[in-house]
Image: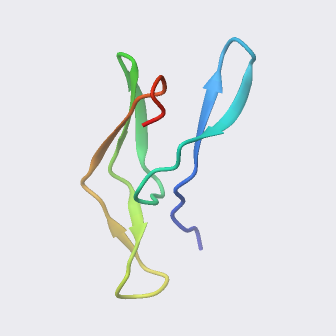
Amino acid sequence: MASALAAVECYDPVTDGWFFTTRMETPVFAASACALGDRIMVAGGLEDSDDIPSVLRVLDDVIAYDPENKT
């Protein structure tokens, strides 16, 4: 079974490579992401349930990531 992760990988077109950056506060699985201006937006997804092991809870959060400030 898949599990939620807090890791964030970013693509750098200049180096044509991927790198890890600041982790998300809430680990998520199967979220959607897009670029909006200079931010990366992560919406929805699933997170591990604290109440029931091996159950994923549906999220209705939107997280904005600022690559310049790494926040």
Q: Which residue is found at the position 69% from the left and 34% from the top?
A: 19
Residue 55, placed above or below residue 63: below
Q: Nearer the viewer, residue 36 or 58?
A: 36
Q: Which residue is found at the position 29% from the left and 59% from the top?
A: 59
Chosen colour scheme? rainbow
| Position of residue 28 measured from the top left corner of the image (x, y, whole percent) | 45, 58
| Position of residue 47 measured from the top left corner of the image (x, y, whole percent) | 41, 66
| Position of residue 56 measured from the top left corner of the image (x, y, whole percent) | 41, 72
Q: Residue reaching furthest top?
A: 14
Q: Nearer the viewer, residue 56 or 68?
A: 68
Tell whether 55 sits left or right of 61: right
Residue 13, placed above or below residue 40: above
Image quarter in which the N terminus is found: bottom right
Residue 47, placed above or below residue 6: below
Q: Which residue is found at the position 70% from the left and 31% from the top?
A: 18
Image quarter in which the C terminus is found: top left
Q: Quadrant of residue 50?
A: bottom left
Q: Residue reaching furthest bottom?
A: 52
Q: Residue reaching furthest front?
A: 69
| Position of residue 32 measured from the top left corner of the image (x, y, whole percent) | 41, 42
Q: Quadrant of residue 39?
A: top left
Tell whether 14 sits left or right of 62: right
